[in-house]
Image (cartoon, helix red, strand yellow):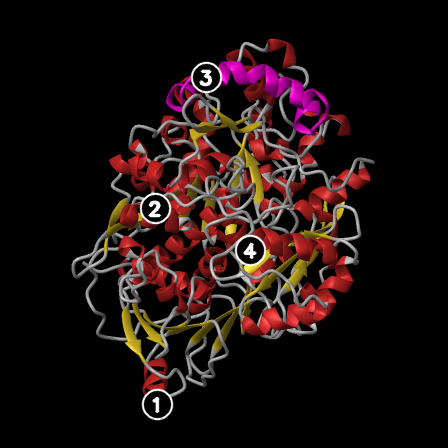
């Protein structure tokens, strides 16, 4: 059986997580990946988890997970043997600066700030990179802001790198090297819910610009564990209040969500009801009411989760007398199964000739966007950015719900056009409205589907199926179509029809359970789940497009969001399956380091710093002038460092430490994100003028392809139904027909009032 990327030869010179995860995704899709490991070994071999907890470099569960399916060779990466491997490769994955002049090679470089940044050699750790990118945030008012746990952030750049590699392969010239320059900082920024745009909007409305709204209810304690109850709409809130038998709070959602005095009162009133019921009972009741709710799973819970079990998601790993369970591939392809035993390729792949120059890798690709909210829309935004013709379908009866996220009705009748989150996810698209509950609306949708190379949706499965837009229906319209379906919980299994959004994915997959302090509750990461899913779906789609180019065959791609979440939160499951251990939440700590997040002399300004080794230790002792700095007691170390930092300005602290090569960064908040000096010259933000809200600086993508696209986006996000006449006219509909469709409310340009 061949994979979608059969024939693709990849050489990986990378250790730890980001580079190997990029290689893993390509190997899952059928590429032949050769990992060149240094003679001293990948540091991940010393990380574990290990069987029985005893260190064994040949039995590291996380190393095996990230490198299964690859050929691992121990070589000097600068030697002749390594150079010969690179000379025969199509893709090089590198977290250093491996030189190569091999013509036709796509060289993917992953670095903290980008290969050509003046910050390239700055001392950093995963903690300080999270700080620099705004991933560290206040999740416990009594403790310092805290990082996302389980090294989740380190997977993010690897996923973007795989997406960049496959994008570059569509346009790579045969007479030179194509560089894909991936910035970890920008990768982390790219997975945040556009806090810089939200801060800009809050300031314009005269509201506090750095208030991080708390999800409601968020993670709460049930009788036998933690459960996430996640209100996304006003109706969800009313239904939750009714379920909790607290209807009087139905009109207080905004005040409670923003942390007003009513918040503590509400939770105190809700806790008795929650404490009388199990996690399973609360989830089942919530889902019956269509309230997004999910259990907060740790490594043990995830392995027992009925949805993962039914779908056989976790697979066996290990060899030679040791075994464990690990996540399977984070996507499923119907014609070229991911992770299958692929044949060894015998010839080089043939690249696609550029359609319209290297600036438009997806030129000529027609995409029908049936998505809602963030994950699916993020993928189609990327495709449109680089040349695809993306037609976004909404309706005046029920527009994309993401339009309402972060938008406020006080802004006027067109308030649904003003949401920063929707705008930033829907650049580069044309917008059409169709009432799919009407026969005429469905007929038009079928005509659009006949013309589409790719159809993307991320509703719960029953939604598109009831409109006749599921895969079986689509291939009857166009046999070679590639359908990308991105349900929260999967297309089958006992939770198939559960409703959910990003916080549910974080909770079920283990992200929430590993984030927070040991003595505190699990914490929502509040950001990355949706865009990470979109990036993984993009990787699978580009592989499927390559398969269709070779064979003419389309297929169904299923990307269950909870499976992507588990794929990037692998360590807790691996460790529990090996040793029966659920490791406590670690706050801001990391094994082998002394590190943390500390106050400064500026209110609400924090710095993160890491001490990696003896050199860092002696330098920190010197800069603090503290020869008695506690080394063996982490709590005493934190107390001493906090006393030193709290008397100094954040910029002074970071400068003093970085000057001595000690990793340190200010914890960036939303109002600082437009001014990050590490973004200068990278062109990460681009200006576009929206028809209703005017000019904004929108984030781009965390990669640069050279030669390749020179811009991150092509045009501003559309207003509702902005392209109705253009799109429907191209289908042959007359002016009279368009007028009739408007009269019958099949199409329109304004939300239909209830």
Q: Which residue is mark 2?
A: 573
Which residue is painted at 37% across and 88% down in the image? 79
User: How far apart are the two marked residues, 4 and 2, measured between alpha carbons?
Assistant: 29 Å
Q: Name the one closer to the observer, 752 or 327.
A: 327
Sequence-wise first label, 2 or 1: 1
User: How far apart are the two marked residues, 1 and 3, measured between alpha carbons?
Assistant: 64 Å
Looking at the rendered structure, the secondary structure element under dot 4 is: loop
* Crowd class of label 4 (few under 14; some 14 to 19; many from 20; radius 10 Å): few
Looking at the rendered structure, the secondary structure element under dot 3 is: loop
Residue 266 lies in the magenta stretch: yes
Label at residue 80: 1
* Crowd class of label 2 (few under 14; some 14 to 19; many from 20; radius 10 Å): many
- Closer to the camera: disc 2 or disc 1? 2
Sequence-wise first label, 3 or 4: 3
Which residue is painted at 49% across and 55% down in the image? 156
User: How far apart are the two marked residues, 4 and 1, measured between alpha carbons?
Assistant: 47 Å
User: How far apart are the two marked residues, 2 and 1, measured between alpha carbons?
Assistant: 39 Å
Q: Name the one closer to the observer, 392 or 647.
A: 647
Label at residue 289: 3
């Amino acid at each position: 059986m061949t994979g979608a990327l059969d024939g693709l030869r990849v050489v990986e010179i990378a250790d730890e997580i980001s580079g190997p995860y990029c290689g893993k995704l390509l190997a899952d899709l059928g590429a032949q990946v050769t990992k060149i490991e240094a003679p001293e070994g990948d540091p991940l071999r010393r990380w574990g988890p290990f069987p029985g907890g005893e260190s064994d470099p040949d039995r590291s569960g996380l190393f095996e997970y990230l490198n299964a399916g690859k050929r691992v060779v121990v070589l000097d990466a600068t030697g002749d043997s390594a150079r010969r491997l690179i000379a025969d490769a199509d893709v090089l994955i590198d977290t250093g600066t491996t030189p190569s002049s091999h013509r036709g090679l796509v060289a993917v470089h992953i670095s903290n700030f980008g290969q050509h940044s003046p910050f390239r050699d700055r001392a950093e750790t995963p903690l300080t990179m999270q700080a620099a990118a705004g991933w560290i945030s206040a999740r416990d008012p009594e403790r310092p802001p805290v990082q996302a746990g389980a090294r989740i952030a380190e997977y993010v750049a690897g996923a973007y790198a795989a997406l960049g590699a496959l994008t570059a392969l569509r346009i790579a010239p045969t007479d030179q090297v194509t560089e894909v320059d991936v910035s970890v900082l920008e990768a982390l920024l790219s997975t945040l819910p556009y806090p810089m745009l939200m801060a800009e909007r809050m300031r314009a409305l005269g509201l506090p610009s750095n208030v991080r709204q708390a999800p409601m209810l968020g993670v709460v304690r049930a009788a036998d564990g933690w459960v996430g109850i996640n209100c996304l709409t006003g109706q969800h809130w009313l239904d939750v209040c009714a379920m909790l038998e607290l209807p009087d709070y139905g009109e207080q959602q905004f005040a409670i969500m923003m942390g007003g005095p009513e918040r503590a009162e509400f939770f105190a009133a809700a806790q008795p009801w929650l404490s009388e019921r199990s996690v399973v009972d609360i989830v089942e009741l919530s889902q019956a009411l269509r309230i997004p709710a999910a259990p907060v799973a740790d490594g043990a819970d995830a392995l027992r989760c009925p949805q993962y079990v039914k779908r056989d998601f976790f697979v066996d790993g290990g060899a030679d007398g040791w075994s464990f369970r690990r996540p399977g591939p984070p996507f499923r392809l119907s014609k070229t199964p991911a992770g299958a035993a692929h044949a060894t390729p015998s010839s080089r792949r043939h690249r696609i000739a550029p359609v319209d120059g290297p600036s438009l890798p997806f030129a000529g690709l027609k995409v029908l966007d049936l998505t809602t909210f963030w994950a699916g829309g993020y993928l189609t935004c990327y495709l449109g950015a680089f040349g695809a013709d993306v037609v976004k379908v909404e309706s005046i009866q029920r527009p994309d719900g993401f339009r309402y996220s972060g938008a406020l009705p006080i802004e006027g009748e067109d308030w649904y056009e003003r949401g920063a989150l929707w705008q930033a996810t829907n650049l580069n698209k044309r917008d059409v409205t169709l009432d799919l509950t009407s026969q005429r609306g469905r007929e038009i949708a079928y005509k659009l589907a006949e013309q589409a190379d790719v159809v993307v949706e991320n509703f719960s499965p029953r939604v598109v199926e009831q409109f006749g837009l599921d895969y079986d229906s689509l291939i009857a319209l166009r046999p070679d179509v590639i359908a990308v379906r991105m349900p929260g919980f999967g297309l089958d299994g006992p939770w198939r029809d559960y409703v959910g959004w990003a916080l549910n994915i974080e909770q079920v997959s283990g992200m929430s359970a590993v984030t927070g302090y040991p003595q505190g509750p699990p914490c929502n990461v509040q950001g990355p789940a949706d865009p990470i899913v979109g990036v993984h779906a993009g990787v699978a789609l580009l592989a499927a497009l390559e398969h269709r180019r070779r064979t003419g065959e389309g297929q169904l791609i299923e990307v269950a969001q909870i499976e992507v979440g588990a794929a990037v939160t692998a360590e807790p499951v691996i460790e529990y399956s090996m040793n029966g251990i659920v490791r406590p939440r670690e706050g801001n700590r990391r094994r082998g380091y002394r590190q943390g997040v500390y106050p400064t002399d500026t209110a609400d300004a924090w710095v993160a710093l890491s001490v990696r080794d003896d050199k860092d230790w002696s330098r920190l002792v010197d800069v603090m002038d503290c020869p008695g700095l506690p080394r063996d007691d982490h709590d005493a170390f934190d107390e001493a460092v906090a006393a030193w930092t709290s008397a100094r300005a954040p910029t002074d602290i970071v400068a003093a430490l970085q000057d001595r090569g000690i990793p340190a960064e200010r914890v960036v908040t939303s109002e600082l994100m437009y001014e990050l000096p590490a973004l200068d010259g990278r062109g990460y933000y681009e200006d576009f003028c929206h028809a209703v809200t005017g000019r904004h600086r929108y984030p781009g993508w965390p990669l640069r392809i050279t030669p390749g696209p020179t811009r991150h986006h092509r045009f501003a996000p559309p207003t509702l139904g902005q392209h109705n006449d253009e799109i429907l006219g191209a289908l042959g509909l007359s002016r009279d027909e368009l007028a009739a469709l408007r009269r019958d409310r099949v199409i329109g340009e304004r939300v239909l009032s209830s």
